[in-house]
Each structure stands twice: as C-alpha cells, then as structure tokens.
C-alpha cells in the first residue's frame, strides 16, 4: 500500500528561526524514521511528505496515496491539529486518528470539558479567562490550577500553575494571556495521583491498552506533569503500569464521548477524595518510540512499537472499508503497467 507520511519536523522550523519552546510539540527525525520503518516492515511503500505546505505542493502536483499517516501538530490556531486532516478529507484520502472536528475540539480544553460534562464524565470545575477583565469573575474556591486552553506537551504549565489566592491568579493569568495569546483555563486543583491511559481502536471496538501512573520524584515540580518535568522526565518522572479499573472505565467513556478514533491517550487525575477525574484527551498522541507516553506504556505491556503502528493503520482501513492487501496488489499492478508503457 502507498502511504504518505506527514509531520512537522523540529529541525525544519528551528532552521527557520523558531525557538525551542515554539517547536516543543513537534517531532524529531527519530520519530519519523521509526514510523516509516514500522510501516515498511509491514510491506507498505512509504513516501515522506513533510508539513502542511509540502503536502499542499504535492497534492497540487497531482500526487496521491492510498492513505496518509499524519502526525503533524500544526503551528497556528487552536484548530491547528485539524488542518492537514481537513485537507486530506477534501481530497478524499484516508488518514488514521480522529476526525477533523474531534481534533479541533480536543485541543481546546474548555470545549472538551463541556463535552465531557454533557456525557456525565467527571471533570474539575472550571472557568475560562479570555481577557483580563474575566479574572475577577472567577468564583471557584482556592487552590486552583491554570494553564493555556489549547497547548500540548504541558506548555504553559509550571510550578506556578497552582494558585492559592486572588493575587496569584491575576498575575499568572495575565502572564499566560500575554505569552500564549489565547484564553486561560482555570480549574479546581486536583491533588491526587495522575495517570495516562492508552487507547486503541474506534467505536465499539475501542479498548484500553493499559493504565500508566505518572510518578514524580527528585527535583520534579510536585504540582503536576509540568513542562519542565516532561522535558527532564528521565531524572524527574517514573512510569508504572497499574490496575485501576475506575480510571480505565472513565478513559473509555471519555474516548467514546468525543468519538475518538484509532489510537491516542486519555489523561486522568484523582481529586482530594481519591476519585478519578478527566484531565484531557490526546487524539493525536506522540509516537516517539523512546519518550512518548503512549509508547512508554506500550513497552510496559510488551506491545511492540511496530505492532502499534500496524494496529493504527488497520483500524483506519477498517473504518474506511478498505483492505490493505487489495491496495498493495493494486499498487504493484499500477507499477507494472507504468513500466510496460515506458518500455513500449
């Protein structure tokens, strides 16, 4: 099967003058090489396309693929993760992971929380600060937790994200509004254990791969899975497979509520009473074989990386009513015909 691979490469944007923090969510060569290798091991012909601009150029040149494996995070706008999937939809090219509307909603944590509440998935009480005048309207009891409404990789989450009084709230909200140019999510602080849950499959076939607890130690910011903790995870974080049926059940309910597809993660944290509460869903989870949370979890359950990538593709093909063997044979036949014509 002919598979295109789309991604946003850190080195590509660093060469254009972007900062390390600006490209924190983007991927490195190791990730792209690993995905391509896993696809090729299952008999697919892989073309590395690149970012949105490079995909647009290829499409305008008439290039097409049986499927495009997209992991591009995008750069601009709250719906940035949905940009390449939206373009692929316009050209009727199948792609794994969730649909465009899900990717757009999931990156906005306030919209995601609203959806979860409508499906009776427990979330922390929250308010949204869209401008400075909204700070005084926050009527939740302290302590609170603040973060940008639409960032990944824990960007904007620091040791100062836990808020104890009105003055701290005002200062931190102003800083986040100025730095990220987007609303700030203000939530009731959840002081309990934190988990990430690996998900695989779609609809009735969606299942929990495993529940992994995120444990902080050493010099880690104790308030949560902050940006610094993620960047220095080898020294600050350990991961443990745990048996938490209530966490797994909540994650599966959240995954279904948003109609997420193929693979991803759901993050959960316990409140003061020890009950699991939804944090966020990641329908476009990182796929670095060494440091991405979903891949770390897969190692803990002895689920090989190549098999994870293969399972994602198979889930996508099944949703579209496609058969990879038929597509592979068609591609081979097309190549033979082209060869015969060129020789003639």
Image (tube, rainbow, N blue to C red):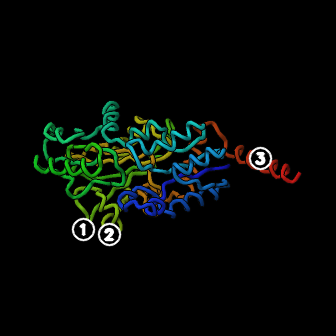
**Residue lying at 29% horizontally and 56% vertically, measured from the top left:** 225
> Which-is-in-front pick, marks 1 and 3?
3
Can residue 320 be seen from the camera position used here?
yes
Residue highlighted by disc 2:
235
Query: Distance of mark 2 from mark 3, alpha carbons?
Result: 52 Å
Q: Secondary structure at mark 2?
A: helix
Q: How many marks?
A: 3
Can residue 304 be seen from the camera position used here?
no
Point out residue 86 in the picture as x, y percentages from the top left corner. Answer: 51, 39
Q: Secondary structure at mark 3?
A: helix
Q: Is residue 199 left or right of residue 267?
A: right
**Residue lying at 48% horizontally and 41% vertically, measured from the top left:** 98
Point out residue 187 in the picture as x, y percentages from the top left corner. Answer: 22, 43
Asked whether the beta carbons under mark 2 and mark 3 sit within 8 Å of each other, the answer is no
Residue highlighted by disc 3:
334
Q: Is residue 4 above or below residue 118?
A: below
Point out residue 250 in the picture as x, y percentages from the top left corner. Answer: 35, 41
- Label 3 Cα neighbours within 10 Å, binned few <14 / some 14-19 / many ≥20: few
Residue highlighted by disc 1:
219
Q: Secondary structure at mark 1?
A: loop
Sequence-first disc among 1 and 3: 1
Farthest-out residue, front: 16
**Residue lying at 15% horizontally and 39% vertically, measured from the top left:** 140
Q: Is residue 157 left or right of residue 107?
A: left
Sequence-first disc among 2 and 3: 2
């Amino acid at each position: 099967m002919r598979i295109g691979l789309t991604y946003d490469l850190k080195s590509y944007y660093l060469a254009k003058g972007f900062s390390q923090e600006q490209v924190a969510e983007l991927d490195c060569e190791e990730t792209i090489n690993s995905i391509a290798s896993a696809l090729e091991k299952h008999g697919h012909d892989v073309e590395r396309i690149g970012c949105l601009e490079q995909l647009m150029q290829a499409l305008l040149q008439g290039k097409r693929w049986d499927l495009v494996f997209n992991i591009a995070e995008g750069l601009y706008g709250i719906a940035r993760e949905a940009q390449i999937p939206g373009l692929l939809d316009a050209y009727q090219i199948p792609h794994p992971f969730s649909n465009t509307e899900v990717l757009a909603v999931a990156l906005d944590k306030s919209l995601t929380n609203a959806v979860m509440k409508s499906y009776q998935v427990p979330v922390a009480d929250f308010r949204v600060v869209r401008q400075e005048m909204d700070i005084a309207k926050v009527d939740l009891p302290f302590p609170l937790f603040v973060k940008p409404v639409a960032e990944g990789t824990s960007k904007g989450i620091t040791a100062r994200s836990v808020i104890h009084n009105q003055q701290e709230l005002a200062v931190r909200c102003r800083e986040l509004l100025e730095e990220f140019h987007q609303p700030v999510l203000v939530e009731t602080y959840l002081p309990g254990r934190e988990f990430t849950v690996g998900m695989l499959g779609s609809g009735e076939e969606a299942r929990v791969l495993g529940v992994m607890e995120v444990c902080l130690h050493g010099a880690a910011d104790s308030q949560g899975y902050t940006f610094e903790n993620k960047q220095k995870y080898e020294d600050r974080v350990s991961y443990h497979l745990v048996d938490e049926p209530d966490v797994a059940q909540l994650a599966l309910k959240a995954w279904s509520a948003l109609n997420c597809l193929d693979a991803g993660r759901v993050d959960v944290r316990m409140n003061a009473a020890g009950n699991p509460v939804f944090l966020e869903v990641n329908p476009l989870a990182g796929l670095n074989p060494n440091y991405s949370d979903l891949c770390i979890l897969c190692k803990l359950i002895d689920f090989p990386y190549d098999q994870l990538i293969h399972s994602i593709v198979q889930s996508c093909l099944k949703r579209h009513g496609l058969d990879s063997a038929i597509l592979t044979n068609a591609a081979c036949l097309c190549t033979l015909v082209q060869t015969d014509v060129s020789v003639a």
